[in-house]
Amino acid sequence: MTQPAGTRTSSTLPPLTSTQEHFLKKYLIEIQLIKELHTLNDPNCCQFLGPPFKVTSNVKTTQPLPLLSFYFHNFITTFPFITNNPPEDQRRFWQDTLQPFITSFNAKPISESQDRVELTTKRKQVNAKILSGLLVFFNSMVTTKNELSYWHDTTRLKPADVGKLDGILHANAKDDHQKPVGLNEYKSMRFVNDLFINIVAVRSVGETKSSTFTWLRSDEDKHNYEFVIQVVGRSEEKHSTYFITRHYSQFATLHSQLTKQFPGIMKTQTINLPSKIKHDAGTNKLTREKLRLALRGYLRSLITQAEIIHFPKFITFIAHNRFYKLSESDLQDYKDRIQHESTLIDTQYEFQQQTTKVMVQLTADFENVKNQLIMNPNAITEIFQDLGKTSDIHKLSPVLKTFNEWCKLQVSSTIYQTFLSQDNSNEWFSKCRKFHKLFPYSIVYTILKFTNPVKIITKIVDLLLVELPSFSWSSDKKQSHNLLSMIFIMLLDEDLSDYEKELNQLKGQHLNQKKFECVLSRIDQYNELTYLEIDSIKQESIELGQEIFVTVLTTKQIEPALPESTVDEILSTPHLHSCVKQYWQLEVRKRDKNLFKQLWTEPELTRLIKEFLTIFYQPLMKIFAKSDVHLVFSSFHKFMDDLMNLLTTITNEGIYYMTSFEIYDSLKSLLDNHEEILWEFMHNVYCKDDQHLFLKLIQWIEKFMIMIRMKFSNPEAVTVTLTSSVPIDADLFMKQLTSRTSKIVEKRRLFREYAKKSAEATTAQEKIDEKWKEMNEGIFGTISSEEFGVGGEDIQEFNDLTELDNLKLKSAPNATERELINRLANLDKLDDFGTSEVDKLESEFEQQLISLFSKINMD
């Protein structure tokens, strides 16, 4: 065939820079991983990976698996909890338990897999993260000749420095704190669906005879306190604000109305209405403070749902009997409560201040072992062996001593944020305190002291998994009938029963007209589609810029078609739109539950659970049984007693008069008082670990570092040559490579731009969380991931993927978040030049990978 004029074709690639080689190699590894991961959907995928799975001669793979085979044989089969078992137990786990389960699972026809759209999304997210994680590893491990200069380019390295921590240290001056948002600070308010709600004061009113409006009247309408609620609306750049007062029984009535109208949303998308809280007298100034914060969190969860904010009863709740100016007493109460919230924020900053001081010292100490970690991956083992050498926590090496201080500060800060500083903290604390009171510590202590926990747990597992006789005569396939599966199926059946009631309620009260029969039929048909058909509809929704629910109503892929008038009525009527959408959501959730029911009836799953417990649980329990675990459990009981008592004192009294430092110091002191027994237990476990399970685990982790740094220590072993076995169009090849590289760089730019915009409009709590993130990233001082052989950009892309997944799961993303999602989706659609020429390198690259990994010996 005659080539077009001006086209240059050759099997030799045009000259590439180190950066171009890096991105080209990364693309080829990604394509190879996608092909190999797709092969894992085959029922015979275990045989493709080879031993220790059972391999039969009549099964052959059409797709080589150089990357997955290497990872599987060097990092999965060598996991210490598996290899610490006798060879026969290992063989039974791989061949008799795991392999039949995977074969059975993959052999199911996709149309019968009962996937719902949410599960499909989550599965895709998991697959994307697995792909991204493996890509980071292999892209860091395999290199090219020119790419080494890319890694050695010091201008690319952007190490964190102690100055960054110093900046946080100085920025944490109290004058620099972001305080709770004020009454008129609209720019600082976090709007959701163009609404901002805050409970700004609590008004003492004595007894009231009747409710302001009839639908909010309760049977017992006597109340002593009303909550003053600020409602702020936003329209473009304009804001409107007003106040209302509501007492608790009106909240309860609203909740009942919403639950009746939106059973699906209230059950799955919002938090529960907080119950009245005991010991909520606070001080004379701050009475009902816990309930105020809890109800504020409840209201803010409601306004994330567009259906709720358009519901007439909710609109009445937040708009009726409004007023525009606070009384002098309300204003003073607001100032007292805002000062209290400021104290809660100051306490978190106090934790950050103290943690930063420790981290500055930890960073300095860590510099002393930095070069050891980089040049000698076994340095982690040497540090870990301090556990065996040092029984006294006060005689630790400087690095471990400072690291221990950092851990205590992190734990105490987490305790504070979870149980004291959030709107729903009191609810969490009440649940934990109730569980603590009911937990049979004494019985468990006696069991741990006088019995063998390994045998007890084994007997319990046997009891749960013993096969019970089946009374079914119609099943043509053996199913699992054990106590554990029956328990889970019973729980799933309860959920399914609830879903059926909610579906019948929607159909009977809101969707009972004949014209909606076709609508419900389309939804039912959607739930019966195969994964590929569902994926096709989702792709159509992306291309049309619609939410998937709208596409289900309009797509031609589902019959029969709906009249345009019906679709318009559903989409233009908020109440009708909400009901149909709820019906759809409940149906796909019901299908998800049926999938889990199907899984729990399979004997392969039962065997897998039992073997997993045997493989992973028993080795641990054998070590703990030798380590006087009953003594540690007794100390843990004492710690929990002290923690619950301290939190009770703080939450009921101290939080209203203690300074930020006093709250910090009380939690930190609690951990100081209990640290020795924990360290003694860790030291004891290390010494009693005669099979060196934990040491092997550390050495297993070190294998990753050895592999990703091999390009520096032995580059010939992991270097590939980028070449093609067939002629390529050099000009088109360069255009394709440049286009793909530009797309990656543009994605990074979009995420940086999003991060900058998000930082400009964050709440005080989000500012604190961001500073924790910065501090934790700076813990290793001047060490950068590149020094260990891992590309910082690769890690950032993995983090960006996680961030994007979290954004997609949000029920009400804000404008900045929606903008990022849409711009990334549009960027993915762009394909100016395709990848035809770049893909011609795949075959040769695959052969080089097969040859390369066959020569690497990790033993």
Image: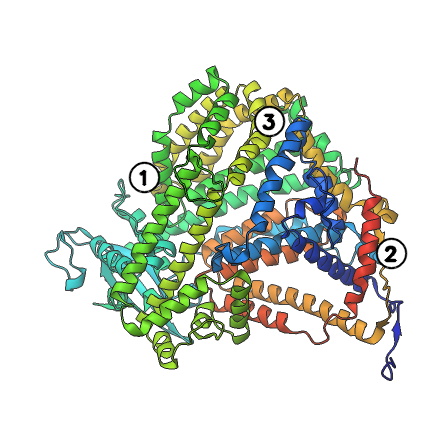
Q: Amino acid at mark 2?
A: Lys
Who is closer to the viewer here, 478 or 226? 478
Q: Amino acid at mark 1?
A: Asn
The local secondary structure at tag 1 comes to helix
Q: Which mark is residue 858?
A: none
Who is closer to the viewer here, 781 or 373? 373
Q: Where, by quadrant of the figure, is residue 836 drawn?
A: bottom right
Sort mark 2 into few (<14), some (14-19) or many (20+) by Cα contacts within 10 Å. some
106 w.r.t. 746: above or below: above
In front: mark 2 or mark 3?
3
Q: Amino acid at mark 3?
A: Pro
Q: Which mark is residue 652?
A: 1
Q: Which residue is mark 2?
A: 145
Q: Which mark is residue 619?
A: 3
Who is closer to the viewer here, 681 or 233? 681
Image quarter hosting the C terminus: top right
In front: mark 1 or mark 3?
3
